[in-house]
Image: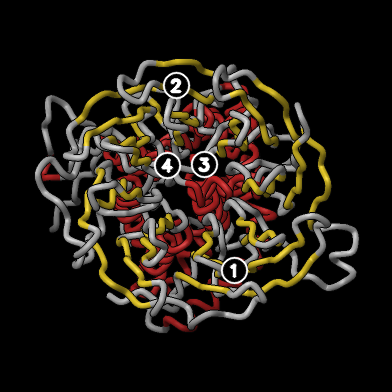
Amino acid sequence: MKNNRLLLFFVLISVSVILTACTGGAGQASSWPGLTLDPDGEVAYVAYGTAIYAVNLESFTQVWRYPLERDNKINFFATPAITEDGQLIAGSFNHLLYSINLENGQGNQQSWPFDGAENTYVGGTLADGNMIYAPSSDNSLYALDLSGNLKWTYAAEDAVWGTPVTDGKYIFLPSMDHRMYALDPQTGREVWKTEPLNGSIAGVPTLGPGGQLFVGTFGSELVALDSATGKVLWRAPASNWVWTGPALDNDWLYFGDLDGVLHGLELTTDSYLERWVYPNANSELSGEPEVGQITGKPVVLDGVVYFGSESGYVYAIDAESGEFKWAQPVNGKIYTDLKLVGDKILVATMGKDELLYMFETDGSQFRSPFIPQN
Amino acid sequence: MNIWDMLILDPMINILLLIYSVLQNFGLSIILFTLLIRLITYPLTYRQFKSMQAMQELQNSPDFKKMQQKYKDDKQKMQQEQMKLYQEKGVNPFGSCLPTLIQFPIIIGLYQAVIRALAVAPTQMVDLNSHAYDFINLSRLVLIDKQFLWMDLSQPERLSIFGFDLFGLGGIPVLAIIVVVTTYLQSKLMTPVSQPGEQGAGMTQAMNLYMPLFMGYLAFSFASGLAIYFVTSNLATIGQYAAMGRLNWKNLIPKRKAKSS
């Protein structure tokens, strides 16, 4: 009988452990690193999990981390923003928006952290002039001054996971309610909103030189809008969700989708031409590494497109022909937008230890990967 | 793709999404999904009942009691004889355990399916995208509304009444309490009336005590979507047994202790 009870106890505990281990406790959410560069390109700020790390990009070493002591209630997913007065603004999954001193990594006090949101921060914050625009999963965009005082709030119809962008005239807000919004930066007044665009909009829209606004949607397409009116100019179909807006280089657009396809589009006067997709018919035959889901925005440098994928590779593709140049593995999945640091490519990964990689344009590593120090 | 995802997780996620696409309410979708699971596993439930009944009859038979009396001082020999009797009468001593064991992968799969379908953060969302079948129009379904009554289905449930906080738990864990009560009722009502000292009675008592507490702990600690599954499943099982006319209401009445002479 004792054995039976022991067996029963063991089974019950096992189920409990499996539930916790396989799913991360009570629905523990997770996301990829949010990566921001300072305007001089000398320091990268990586918001990932329970901390934000400031990393010197020359030495690839840690300058500071925030908070100093681990706090499990804090969980940073949203890409931080840098204000012109030297604050790093980062939203956390605990519904708080933090302000951190860029120089020393100390949390600013005064009105911070801002606690007005009723849900998580997933989308990145926008800092423009003397204003901060923080989107929340509670459907709202919060506009604050640099001291953290709320100036206005705008409510969309569903959560906001995307990052707002501005052309200096309007704030463009993507929402999971399938719409894009244009708002007045000073008052939050709605200037226009689109009709539903066949799917949610996450990621970061891209502003075009001719007043276009390029938006990736869960409706498996890239949509070009007129930023003045919100009118749809054209739609480019993809094979799966398009998580974020495209990289723009002269008259070319480059974007990936969740089927692991990178698209190369050339803009025409009033539409586009799809010039190539990668992988192509030769990719598998040539033994090129398989591409996984693409969620991050690529970067373009000297006629080469660089992008990362969930497969854990960084790829270099010829920007005009779509031909494969090289692929390098990293230790972890890549979902974050790539960044250019001078003539190098900065990659944030979801590796167990390694958080940042820096590649030369020939695919060699600039330094050993950055591993956060606790 | 691994076997678990292919056989358990993906079908569960997609059936949940399919039901949600019709009902547009994730709490109701979990309830309907649970009823569907109970319907599919009904043959097992029925077999469990028959197996328990056969075991009960065998253990009350004169042959069994005579054998117990004969080998009461030799446990090993008694177990051998028991197994022999089980074989002779065609009774599988583990027959009633199988349906219970099958519940565990369902519980684990359902919990994962609920959490993944709700996709509260980007990583979960791209993961959901990779699990959804082609015929599911996922882009029209996300973000899934995780509110059901007063609950956030992705979080453990607590009911806050006028800010009342029971023992600092963040509210009253109503659903966990309901899970404990319904699991207790279910196990009590389904268990055949046993006599003190009867073979297996101790194990049954232990199950009747531990199982509700364990289920209550899971409901208390994990996403409330799982607790909704527990409550619905318990009530459905009680309903199934009631339909078979096999509920043992006598088990709910406390027995008087026999007077010691």
Q: Residue at x 59, y 20 (%)?
A: A196
User: What separation in Å lies between label 1 and label 4 (alpha carbons)?
Assistant: 67 Å
Q: Residue at x 75, y 34 (%)?
A: A236
Q: State the residue in front, A254 or B1.
A: A254
Identify the disc placed on residue A157. Answer: 2
> Does label 4 or label 3 sit earlier along the sequence?
4
Q: State the residue in front, B241 or A208.
A: A208
What subunit carries mark 4?
A
User: Which is more foreground, mark 4 or mark 3?
Assistant: 3
Q: Position of residue A78 (x, y in %)?
A: 39, 48
Q: Position of residue B156 (x, y in %)?
A: 32, 43
- Amino acid type at mark 1: Leu
User: What separation in Å lies between label 3 and label 2 (alpha carbons)?
Assistant: 18 Å
- Amino acid type at mark 3: Val
Identify the disc placed on residue A123. Answer: 4
User: Which is more foreground, mark 1 or mark 4?
Assistant: 4
Q: Quadrant of residue A325?
A: bottom right
User: Which is more foreground, mark 3 or mark 2?
Assistant: 3
Q: Are marks 3 and 1 on the same chain?
A: no
Q: Residue at x 74, y 52 (%)?
A: A261
Vertical placement of A320 versus B43: above or below?
below
What subunit carries mark 1?
B
Disc 3: which residue: A204
User: What separation in Å lies between label 4 and label 3 (alpha carbons)?
Assistant: 9 Å
- Amino acid type at mark 4: Gly
Q: Secondary structure at mark 2?
A: loop
User: Which is more foreground, mark 2 or mark 1?
Assistant: 2
Disc 1: which residue: B85
Vertical placement of B247 versus A320: above or below?
above
